[in-house]
Amino acid sequence: METTDIGLWGVPLAMLGGAIRVSTPFIFVSLGEAITERSGRINLGLEGTLVFGAMSAYAVAVMTGSPWLGLLAAALAGLCFGLFHGWICKFPKVNDIAIGIALMLFGTGLAFFFGKPFIQPSAPDLPAIPFGAWSDIPQVQAALNVNVLFLIGAALAVFLWWAFRNTRIGLMVRVVGDSADAARAMGLNPNTVRLLATGVGGALAGIGGAYLSLYYPGSWTERISSGQGLMAVALVIFARWNPLGCFAAALLFGGAGALGPALQSVGVTEGYYLFYAAPYILTLIIMIATSSRSRTLAGAPGELSITK
Amino acid sequence: MTGKFMLSRRDLLKTSAAGAALGLASAAFPMRAARAAAATVGFIYVGPKDDYGYNQAHAEGAASLKGVEGISIVEEENVPETVDVQKTMESMINLDGASLIFPTSFGYFDPHMLAMCAKFPDVQFRHCGGMWNKDKHPMNAGSYFGYIGMGQYLNGVVAGHTTKSKKLGFVAAKPIPQVLLNINSFLLGARSVDPAITCQVIFTGEWSLAVKEAEATNALIDQGADVVTCHVDSPKVVVETAAGRGAFICGYHANQSPLAPEKYLTGAEWNWAKVYKMFIDDLIAGKPLPNFTRGGLADGFVKMSPLGPAVGEAARKQFDATLAEMMKGGFSVIKGPLKSNKGAVVATEGQAFVETAIELESMDYLVEGVVGSTA
C-alpha cells in the first residue's frame, strides 16, 4: 500500500469524506420523515425501520449474493412498517407519536430476532463510483469514492423540493398536512394520503438502513445504527421540513461526526469527548440562531401533533 | 428513600413468577429443580454473543461448559452497563437460581455488581477485568483477567516487521488501564523491531460504535498508518474497513482472519474456556473460589491467532522467539528506561514490570512513541 503524507489536510479531507460516507442514512431517513411530516403525521418509528432495513438488506444479500436484492428487500420491509404505522394511525384517538415509539422498539427487536444468524457471514457491498480517480493521492481517492445511494439521495432531495412545489401530488400532501378540513373540502381523503406518505417514508428509511449494512460501515451488528434514525427525525425539524435543508443538515452531521477521529489522527488529542459532541453543539447553536420570538417553527405543517 | 417502598416492574414479575415457579417446579419438574440445585452459572454480556470480539470470546468460554455434569448455564446478552445489569443479576439469582455469576463487561463492576454482592451474600460474583481488593471489596466478589497485553506485544512485533510507513494505527474505545496497556504493548513490540516506529491512537469513547470505528480507521490510514489494530468490543468493522483500504490488520479478542484472510497478520485472543473451567472445577469440588485470578500466555488464558500469509520470515522468527521467551514466564513489556509521551519517567533504568505486576493494572499513561492522549 502506498501512502502520501497529507498532514493537516487530513482534517478537511476527512470531513469531506465523512460527510459523503456517513450522511447517506441521515439523508434517506430525513427525506422519508419529511414526506410523512408534510402530510401531517410524525413517524418516530424510523429508527426501528432503519435497523430492520439494515438487517433485511444484509440477510437477503447474504442469501442471494446480490446487494441490489437486499436493497429492494429493505425498501419493501420499510414500506410495510410505514403502511402499518399509517394504517393504525387512521383510527380515531390514536396518537402517532406513541405508535411510532412502539414501532421503533418493535422494529429493532424484530431485527435482532431475525438478524442473529447473519452477524457472522459477510455480504457483498453496494458499488461505489471512484470520483477521485483523477487524483494520484490515495487519501483523496478514498474520500471521493462515492456510493450510488448518496447520489440517489442527493437527486431525491432536489426532486422532492421541486415536487412539493410544482406537482399535484406535492400539493395534495401539503394540503393534507396543513389542514385536513381543507383537504376534505377538496375531495381528498387525508387518511389515504397520510397512509401512502408514511409508507413511502418507511421505504426510504429502509433504504437508509441498507446503506448502513451493505456499504458503510458495511456489516450487520445489533449496534449498527447507534441512534441515527432518531437523529434523522430530529434533523427534519432542524431543516424546517425542506428536503434541500434535510440534505444539507445530513451533510453537516456527517462531516461534524468525522471531526473527532480526524483531529485525533493529526495529533489534536486533548478533549476528544468535546469534539464528539460537535454535531450536537452545532445543532443547538443553529436552532438558537434561527429561532424567532415572533413566530413558532416556520414551515411546520399545521396538522402535526407537535404544532397543534 | 422513597425508592425502597416502590415495587419495580422487575420485582413484581419476579414475585409473581417465583410464586408460580414454586408451585409448578415442585409438581411438574422435580428433576429440573434438583439439577438446578447442583449449580446454575450466569453469564452477562454487554453486546451480542457472536460479535467477532469480546462477547464472542466469553460466550465461547461459556459454551464450553455446557457438557459439564451438574452445571447449567444461563446467559443474557446486550445488557447495558447501567442499573439494567443489576436487574439481570437479580433475575438470574431469583428466577434461575444462579449461585455463581460472571458479569463480563468492565462497567458492570462498580457500583452494579458490588451492590448485588451486598444484597446476595450467598451468591458468588466474579467480574472480568475489575480490580478486586481484599480491603475494599466483599469476599463473595472477585475478578479475573488475562495478560493480553503480551499478545498485543507480539502483534506489535509482527506489525513492526510488516509496516513500511513506520506508522501504526490503534482504534481504542476508552482510556482505561487495560486499553492503555494494550496500546503501549503494541507500540513497544513494534519498537523492539525498529525504534523509529510510532503508533497513532484514536479513542472512540464507547465500546461499540460501528460508524465511528470505521471513521477512525479511515482517519488513521489517511495519515499513513499501514498496520491497524484495535481494542473495541467488536473488531469486525475495523478489520473490514482497514482491509478494504489495503492496510494490514492485527486482530483482538477473537480470530478475525476469516474477515480478511490476506491482510490479517496475527491476533491476540482470549481463551476463556480454560478460565471458566477452573472456576467450575472448584465449584464442583466444593472448594472456595479464588477472588483474584490472573494469567497470561503461559497459563493458557490468552492465545495467538495463527500467522497470516503476509507475515515475512524475519517477523516469523522474532515472533516465535519472543513467544518462547514469554512462555517461560516473567517477561516484562514495560521496562526502563521508559518515558510517557508527556515526558514523565514511567520506569527508571533497570526497573521492569513483569506481566503480573499489579502496578500495570492502574496504568494511566501512553508511552513515548504513541501519538494520543488519555483524556
Image: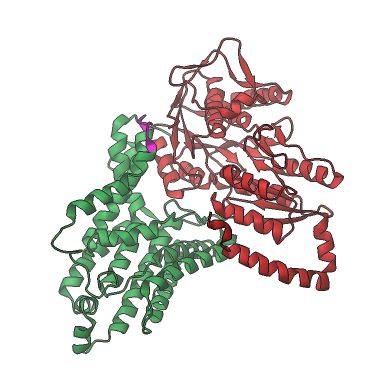
- Place of residue B206 in the rendered image (x, y in percent of width and height, measured from the top left): 47, 44
Above or below — where is B203 with respect to B332?
below
Q: Is residue A141 visible?
A: no
- Place of residue A34 in the rendered image (x, y in percent of width and height, measured from the top left): 28, 67
Q: Is residue A133 left or right of residue B341?
A: left
Single out the residue that lies furthest toward the top. Answer: B349
Q: Which chain is green?
A: A
Which residue is at a point 55% across and 12% down the rendered structure image?
B348
Quadrant assignment for the C terminus of chain A: bottom left
- Place of residue B332 in the rendered image (x, y in percent of width and height, measured from the top left): 64, 21
Q: Is residue A270 magenta?
A: yes
Which residue is at a point 58% across and 57% down the rendered structure image?
B4
Colour scheme used in the picture? by chain
Which residue is at a point 60% across and 61% down the rendered structure image?
A117
Highlighted range, magenta: A265-272
Image quadrant of residue A96? bottom left
Q: Which chain is red?
A: B
Q: Main secondary structure of the magenta part?
A: loop
Of the pair A126 and A12, the residue shown nearer to us: A12
Of the pair B309 and A207, the residue shown nearer to us: A207
